[in-house]
Amino acid sequence: MAAVDDLQFEEFGDVATSLAANPDATTINIEGPGETPKRLGPPRGSGREEDDELLGNDDSDKTELLAGQKKSSPFWTFEYYQTFFDVDTYQVFDRIKGSLLPIPGKNFVRLYIRSNPDLYGPFWICATLVFAIAISGNLSNFLIHLGEKTYHYVPEFRKVSIAATIIYAYAWLVPFALWGFLLWRNSKVMNIVSYSFLEIVCVYGYSLFIYIPTAILWIIPQKAVRWILVMMALGISGSVLAMTFWPAVREDNRRVALATIVTIVLLHTLLSVGCLAYFFDAPEVDHLPTTAVVPNQTVVAAKSS
């Protein structure tokens, strides 16, 4: 029979202290069912969590998984296209701010787009840019030749259709070509970052917002000011594109990666310089036709008789 002293209860110290003294000891949690167990280990590094949150690593993966679980409508229905415009004003303004203030080392898609890519912002940004370029080009033509007696102002409405063709073709065809190229390279190099076609269109659409105030300021009839403005806009929007698509090609062959980024920037430069040169630097002049003064033959004949 066991002695009485062997049956006495013994008080132990803190669990954390006991575990530190004997790491191999087994502990039993006898807390109530409604209580949550306390974490004894050291807290996770907050810096890593903040980086993941900013880059969207955890949230984007969860969003992709949830997006796959959503019931998708057929493409011929209105509900299918309604999802592309399901975005609020705060998200649009936040993405516009991100395109105007690019953060070095941060991915524009992961920060702003991947959670909910949309077509609402890119569509209206392109539409506003079309009218801004066409109207500003007409006003620039009027201000340059203002005061000339032989100049007759005629609104050039065809500039609207030309600007719409250029802007929308660039905002859709270039992303489509880039998306196809990234898919092809993704089959060659399996570990590169992949973007969807909608995400690429979204990036290109929001990157064009800087040209709306730039086109309005192009009304100033000074070539030096215009070229300074276009270089500033090109630097901001081009950096957004370069920092967004560099992670998608940096794991590829070095020459292929550099050639891809250079091509993206060159096409963006061609759009900026082409719009400035066609709509503003070379305005068409419409002068009044000069009519020759014909002497009055009746008066001359009367004087001679």
Image: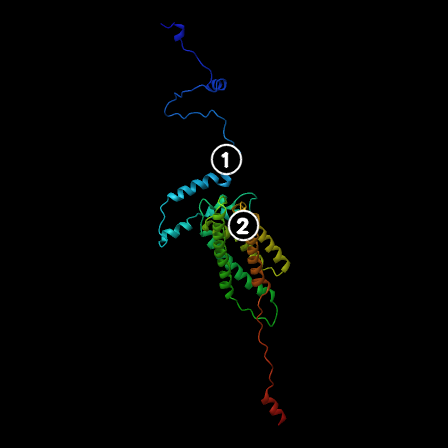
Q: Secondary structure at mark 2?
A: helix
- Horizontal and vertical percent for residue 98? 52, 46
Categorize mark 1 by other alpha carbons within 10 Å: few (<14), some (14-19), many (20+): few
**What is the number of callouts on the image?**
2
Can residue 96 be seen in the rendering of this structure?
Answer: yes
Look at the image and tell me in which quarter the C terminus lies.
bottom right
Task: Of the two numbered discs 1 and 2 on the same chain, state the one appearing first in sequence.
Answer: 1
- Horizontal and vertical percent for residue 294? 60, 84
> How far is mark 1 from mark 2, CA to CA?
26 Å
- Horizontal and vertical percent for residue 293? 60, 82
- Horizontal and vertical percent for residue 76? 36, 55
Compare residues 65 and 130 and report the one nearer the observer.
Answer: 65
Check disc 2 and give the amino acid type: Leu
Can residue 157 be seen in the rendering of this structure?
Answer: no
User: Which residue position holds label 1?
Assistant: 49
Q: Secondary structure at mark 1?
A: helix
Lateral position of residue 33 relative to residue 209, left or right: left
Compare residues 102 and 284 and report the one nearer the observer.
Answer: 102
Categorize mark 2 by other alpha carbons within 10 Å: few (<14), some (14-19), many (20+): many
Residue pictured at 42% horizontal, 50% vertical: 84
Residue 250, numbered label? none
Query: Up-down: is 161 above or below 7?
Result: below
Q: Are the two marked residues, 1 and 2, in contact with CB atoms closer than 8 angstroms?
A: no
Lateral position of residue 120 relative to residue 229, left or right: left
Q: Which of the 4 image quarters holds residue 297?
A: bottom right
Q: What is the residue that sits farthest to the right in this orientation?
A: 224
Query: Up-down: is 77 above or below 55?
Result: below
Look at the image and tell me in which quarter the N terminus lies.
top left
Residue pictured at 38% horizontal, 5% vertical: 4
Check disc 1 and give the amino acid type: Glu
User: Which residue position holds label 2?
Assistant: 241
